[in-house]
Amino acid sequence: MNIHGSGATALALLCLLWQSAAWAQVYPTKPVRLLVSFSAGSGTDTIGRIVAGGMAQAFGQQVVVENRAGAAGNIGAEIAAKSPPDGYTLFLVNMGHAASVTQIGTTIAAHDANARRMCH
């Protein structure tokens, strides 16, 4: 058995573990934005503010509630979709909005298919 090889391997593993711990970042390192796609004072906003308070306490970081009402929640959804995928923008929707998005997508696809059949 090669003792020097085992020691070198253990030392290399120890260095890797130490470096990976140094590279790991604690989330979040800056305030988190919670997008609510309905107006302030609405039921969705109230739930969002309650959730944001619990998240802020758990994270130890500020969670900012940002209301972006309009177009049945689609304005907030568009802003959330175009936000950087870094985990610092969260989007709160209600069940009606989630169902509406899937129906709109299906309706548009069906409309496009019908339009193509009619034009050819």
Image (cartoon, rainbow, N blue to C red):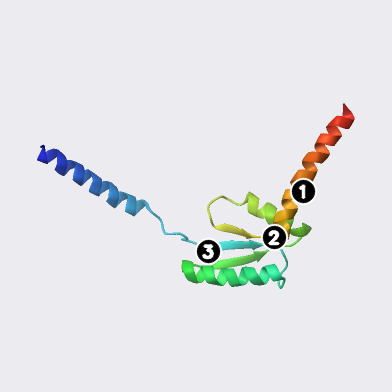
95 sits left or right of 112 in the view: left
Disc 3 target residue = 31
Marks 1 and 3 sit apart, C-alpha to C-alpha, by 33 Å
Query: Under tag 2, what secondary structure?
Result: helix
Three-letter code for the amino acid on which mark 3 is drawn: Pro
Three-letter code for the amino acid on which mark 2 is drawn: Met
Q: Position of residue 31 (x, y in %)?
A: 52, 64
Disc 2 target residue = 95
Crowding near pointer 3: few (<14 within 10 Å), some, many (20+)?
some
4 sits left or right of 104 in the view: left
| Mark 2 or 1, nearer chain start | 2
Disc 1 target residue = 104
Query: Under tag 3, what secondary structure?
Result: loop
Q: Residue at x 74, y 45 (%)?
A: 105
Can residue 75 be seen here? The reply is no
Q: Residue at x 80, y 40 (%)?
A: 110
Compared with 65, 120 (above or below) is above
Residue 70: image tag: none
Compared with 40, 12 (above or below) is above
114 sits left or right of 85 in the view: right
Name the residue furthest right.
Answer: 118
Three-letter code for the amino acid on which mark 1 is drawn: Ile
| Mark 1 or 3, nearer chain start | 3
Q: Quadrant of the N terminus?
A: top left
State which mark lies toward you, 2 or 3.
Answer: 2
22 sits left or right of 94 in the view: left
